[in-house]
Amino acid sequence: MPLLLSLLLAASPVGPSVAAAESLITEDLLRAHVRFLASDLLEGRAPATRGDALAEAYIASQFESLGLRPAGTDGYRQPFELLGVQGRPEALVFSAPGRTLSLAVPGEVVAGPGDAAMESRLDRAEVVFVGYGIQAPEYAWDDFKGMDVRGKVLLVMNNDPSDDPALFAGRTRLYYGRWTYKMEMAQRLGAAGVVLIHTTASAGYPWQVVQTTFGGEQFFLPSPELGPPVRAWATEEACRRLVALAGKDLDALSKAAELRTFQPVPLGISVSTAFHNTVRRTQSANVLALLPGSDPRRAGEFVVYTAHHDHLGMRQGAAPGEDAIYNGAVDDAGGVAQLLAVARAFSSLPKRPARSVLFAAVAAEEKGLLGSQYLVRHPPVPLGRIAVDINMDGFHIFGATRDVSVEGLGKTSLDRTLAELARTQGRVLVPDEFPDQGYFYRSDQFSFARAGVPALHFSAGTDVVGQPAGWGRAQQEAWVATHYHQPSDEVSPEWRLAGAVQDAQLYFLLGVAVAQAPGLPSWVKGDEFEAAGKAVRAAVVP
């Protein structure tokens, strides 16, 4: 069935009406949406702020102007409750017999609450090095080896093992390598806290991103089980000093952690800290709009487009005259601009596609994919009736490209369709060009994938038209190092948005193809999400 579906989709030509709609996606349109959403007026669009509400209102008004139906529980809005928790210690103090080590916040360590308690406390909690902190039965891998870590603090490496290409996915990071997985494991095993060893190479971003992302108020969806009481990220140099306090060598510990035979290492040291938290119940909202399908048999099946409308807000304690607004122009006003442009193209079609199309500007992505998680838990249609989630996070600012970088290439039956459509643009598909950074698991498509819904994210690659080989990759790496999650992510006259237009047009064409196809996409055989996909599809079979 997946191969047959791919052939059917690929055979669908881009007709005159689709081409006319595609032509409505322009650089000026994208830039105009970004200019408003990333303006200082919105103060960085942090969840549950005035800027957040302004972004929601703007997006809803754009949906209404296109004649799209409200699909939220409150008009276009799908409001949901958030727990906002803010608090941080001055330091984490590690103790060994006769010696102590104090790591300062936020220069050496960024620490905060992992749950909604009014006070976070570690009182001489034992520290255990648990390598990558992974339990993966399919790889016969268990970093805990039955050790009881209840009440202990886990010192954990970022990423997942990569020395052996036959284990995990070699250099390609899986979800096991994400910091969220480490926190989930700690909570499941009853640990009191986590200290994650940060390196730029293992995280995919520099230390200042940790400070900006995790240094302020943190948000959670209300749940009886949130996470370990204390979450912390520490620099590599700080962790070297930490394990040296225990008479150990970080390089030696890390090398041992690359093997299945690794055993968790009690370090013989403890950690203490205590801080009070401010806890509030507040709201944000997803913004949802629907283009109903034209086929009575297939209108109950949805093609879903997502992009997140939130960002990091404003920096507290900024010096006078210092830029304190995290405008989030590329991340993700750019993605929302593409979402709105694709919605405009669909709304201009003289005949609606067979399946319905849902446009979802989701909230609180930067706080842990919370808006898309809520949408997946409270979908407007059963998950098994969602054909695909096409997610837009960030957009390309360096010019037209000859390639399309697909995160998760080879995971769904849509690859051939996407390749054929890209070919009409003179572009070719390439695998994720930064596989060690785990992008597939870092944005809202993961919320859908984890629930079994076929999902993908792609964007212009690094083969930039008119530039020498390697130029595009260097530009992207420099942008992450300098502007990612920083106040400098602002609208710039130097942007060249031809690649962003290519991408938005490709998002549109793929959605049209899926909305018109006889069958539904699927995960490929053996994929990590195949079983979940079969389960959600089976749940809605008549």
Image: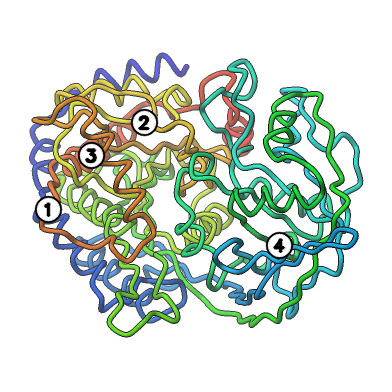
Q: What residue does disc 3 label?
A: 503
Q: Nearer the viewer, residue 260 or 48?
A: 260
Give the CA distance from mark 3 to mark 1: 19 Å
Compared to residue 394, the image places residue 399 above or below, namely above
Q: Amino acid at mark 3?
A: Asp
Q: Earlier in the sequence, mark 4 or mark 2?
A: 4
Give the CA distance from mark 3 to mark 2: 11 Å
Q: Horizontal and vertical percent for residue 90?
A: 65, 75
Q: Residues within 10 Å of mark 3 (few under 14, many from 20)?
A: many
**Element class at badge 4:** loop
Give the CA distance from mark 4 to mark 1: 42 Å
Q: Residues within 10 Å of mark 1 (few under 14, many from 20)?
A: few
**Residue 406 shows which numbered tag?**
2
Q: Quick check: marks 4 and 1 in contact, CB under 8 Å? A: no
Q: Nearer the viewer, residue 272 or 283?
A: 272
Q: Earlier in the sequence, mark 3 or mark 2?
A: 2
Q: Residues within 10 Å of mark 2 (few under 14, many from 20)?
A: many
Residue 418's image quarter? Answer: top left
Give the CA distance from mark 3 to mark 4: 36 Å
Q: Earlier in the sequence, mark 3 or mark 4?
A: 4
Q: What scheme was used to colour the molecule?
A: rainbow
Q: Residue furthest bottom?
A: 320
Compared to residue 296, the image places residue 421 above or below, namely above
Q: Amino acid at mark 4?
A: Leu
Residue 488's image quarter? Answer: bottom left
Compared to residue 151, the image places residue 173 above or below, namely above
Q: Amino acid at mark 1?
A: Glu
